[in-house]
Image: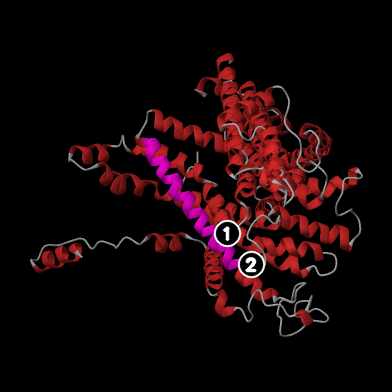
Amino acid sequence: MLEFLARRTLGAIATLLVVIAAVFFATRLSGNVMDYMLPPGVDIETKQAMVERFGLDQPIWVQFIRFMQGIFSGEWGLGLYERRSVVEIYAERIPNTLQLFAYALGLAVVLGLPLGIVAALQRKSVLGSAIMTLAFVGYATPNFVLAIVMILVFSFNLHWLPSSGDASALHFLMPAIVLAAPMLAEIIRFARNALLDVMGQDYLRTARAKGLPERLVIGKHALRNAAIPVVTVIGLQVAGMVARCVLVEAVFATKGVGDLIVFATIGRDYPVLQFGVILIAGLVVVTSLVVDVLYSAIDPRVKVTAS
Amino acid sequence: MTDLIARTTATASGARVPARRPRPSGLAYLWGKAGLAMRLYMLLLALTLLVAALAAVLAPYDPNAQTLLARLKPPVGMAGANPAHLLGTDQLGRDIYSRTLHGLQLTMVIAFAGSFISLLIGVTAGVIAGYARGAIGAAIMAVVDIQIAVPFTLIALLVIAVFGNSLPVLIAVIGVAGWESYARIVRAQVLSVSRMPFVEAAIAAGASDWRILFKHVLPNVASPIIVVWTMTFSAVILLESSLSFLGLGVQPPTATLGSMVGMGRDYLASHAWIAVIPSLVIMFVSLLVLLIGDWLRDALDVKLK
């Protein structure tokens, strides 16, 4: 267990270091940042002074070492537009994004697990196939199409929900549903398949043969064993959700990390963009590490086969 | 041909040759295996591709031609529609039907070109990683692991921020997406096939590495590659539309389905059709590709792990 943990942690750290290096070199590929940061018509001396001040006249590897030193001492640079520390800028945005994640994940799990279980237990009925059809459509609908349709129906036609902003919890409902939809679909599919797999196992027949009531057969034996793959897929979905939040937040203007990253891309605000990329990559890497550890804690077989 | 000659000569000499059923080609085989609904999906997809290919012929107007006097006209069937514009016009008086056709075409071109590039990169990397099992193989697989770990949207945003948004950049970005799934599958297949007796026999018979690769290894990976390709194709359509939707795809006024939705978003409250029509087309295409991909995976019996 310890060795497995150590190897996975090392792998995660290596991945993050590569991401940081890639982000650094990619943003320097586009030439001198000063060329488009300074207003047009700036004289050569001022420009030279700025270049020296930001250390842009140093060889690239010197810049890289400084960049890494900055990262480890917590100096992440200033946003090009807001002129304050990117850490500060992000700190303001993170609560909104976490709130959105919590709603979306809660929605997907709270609805997805029971729906998946019903779909498995009722797989030959109309209800079962209706759930699965819904799951497929939810999976195939692009995020922004769902967002557009929901805004159209619930904001403009019914006037039930606000179409954008972050003023109240109600503002987060639509983005949370859009963010949750593909995740919900995947959880339904996985929960159903995992439960169906388990239902065919010998130990369930044994449980029934020894006269256990059906609710215990399903509740104690089937669900517990079906939980293993479902935990993994929830973990994987978190990574997907983090990636999708960029688009969803941009559509609903929830003032979170995602729309910040999109505007940094459009405005070429490299310090903001690179911090955002590293932040989200870090979040994803840590999530999959946690899922792996959790997985091996639930299912002892994983540790043996992990190598 | 040789079969035919052999059979005719054999029959002529009086020997009995069992009549051999010709092996159906890939598409005919799949068509025969498909149910009624799946055949309908396939026909619909073929029709969609045909329509996309013939956009220039089918579109009644230049997609970028503006008729400012006929701005924001609703589709035929709604009050105030102009019969000259079947699906209405947008805020600049451009014909939405024409733009949707051209947008569909460009979306398809980007998706085909991008997914083909990622297929080439992925298969090549997978073959190399499978053959060169030392440091090179390990390095390729490390890159694969990293790309899996980092959400691709972020890589795409980074590349677009650095190189700007243009059609070549967009295709390149999409080409880099998804190669890792091919690389993993091809590598695994190379590793397992190269231990098969028929490959050992070919080696013993003196076949070159290239011959073994093209005659024995790659034909055996064809099914998983096709399945991964269908899966990535719908993902690629969604990636392209999402980026264009955010204004990070092709430059206006060029239409792709995603950029049309993105532009139409500003008029959603009053003129919803501008965004809704291309949205429906994207959803239709993505649903079709996913349905067919799901079915192909079962039909070709591919295990993606």
* Residue ID for mark 2: B254
Give me the chain letter of mark 2. Answer: B
Q: Which mark is residue B167?
A: 1
Which residue corresponds to the image point at 74% horizontal and 63% vertical from the top-left? B263
* Magenta range: B104-130
Res A277 visible = no
Residue A11 falls in image quadrant: top right
Taking the image as shown, residue B229 lies to the left or right of residue A24, namely: left
- On the image, the x and y values in percent for residue B9 come to 11, 66
Front residue of this view, candidates B302 and A270: A270
- On the image, the x and y values in percent for residue A188 come to 68, 43
Q: Is residue B93 magenta?
A: no
Which residue corresponds to the image point at 90% horizontal and 61% vertical from the top-left? A158
Taking the image as shown, residue B151 lies to the left or right of residue B117, namely: right
Taking the image as shown, residue B174 lies to the left or right of residue B70, namely: left
Q: Give the amino acid type for the residue marked by disc 1 in the picture.
A: Leu
Find out whether the residues at labels 2 and 1 contact each other: C-beta distance under 8 Å.
yes
- On the image, the x and y values in percent for residue A23 come to 61, 37
Front residue of this view, candidates B219 and B61: B61
Can you say whether A111 is above or below A306 in the image? below
Q: How many marks?
A: 2
